[in-house]
Amino acid sequence: MTSHDVTTGAVTWPDQLYDLLKRANITQFAYVPDAGHRVLIDRSLADPDVHSVALTTEEEGVALLAGADLGGARGVLLIQSSGAGNCINMLSLNKGGKFPLLMLISMRGEFGEGNPWQFPMGQATQPVLEAMGTIVLRAEAPAEVIPTVEAALTMVFQSGETVAVLLTQRLIGAKKFA
């Protein structure tokens, strides 16, 4: 159930990303609904081999994935930059408990943003995550997504680190704001 670019017939980078996560034995998808993660969310919901959990707030995902690790499962947290700030206090759980955490964050408040409400957290996401000890990687173009997430998967699941991959607005595009 992959989607394709209608003009070229090529598999899209979000589909390649979902396939990579599955090959890495990711079985827990924690998310707050977001258009930037639409393909990952839709595919996880349709996949009987994974558990896809809609969160009421982003920080719930940090605890959910710590529990998944304790149960021997691997997971990913899918959120938008505007919600990353909600996770800051909960990231102390990962620091203290040494739980691995992979976050894929769709960015707002960057390249081409028209919504003034998205700028504060969009601009603060990377430095605030880094202040909490999170390793931050960025994907700016489709060709960067898979190698960047592969690197993050190694860092998270072999070294037990907390890693956020920022899927930038150059990559996902800016939403229209009226």
Image: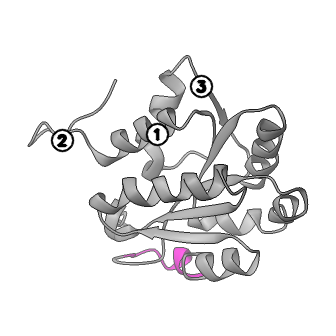
Q: First in sequence: mark 1 or mark 2?
A: 2
The residue closer to the viewer here, 75 or 77, is 75
The local crowd at label 3, few if under 14, some if 14 to 19, many if 20 or more residues have their Cα within 10 Å, is some
* Amino acid at pointer 3: Val
Foreground: disc 3 or disc 1: 3
26 in relation to 133, above or below: above
Label 3 residue SS: loop
Q: For residue 35: magenta?
A: no
Label 2 residue SS: loop
Q: First in sequence: mark 2 or mark 3?
A: 2
- Residue highlighted by disc 3: 50
Q: Is residue 178 visible?
A: no
* Amino acid at pointer 1: Leu
The local crowd at label 2, few if under 14, some if 14 to 19, many if 20 or more residues have their Cα within 10 Å, is few
- Region rendered in magenta: 113-120
- Spatial CA span between label 1 and label 2: 16 Å
Foreground: disc 2 or disc 3: 3
The residue closer to the viewer here, 175 or 29, is 29
Is 78 situated left or right of 11 in this image?
A: right
Residue at 57% from the left image edge and 19% from the top image edge = 49
- How far from the left and from the top, in percent, is residue 103? 61, 56
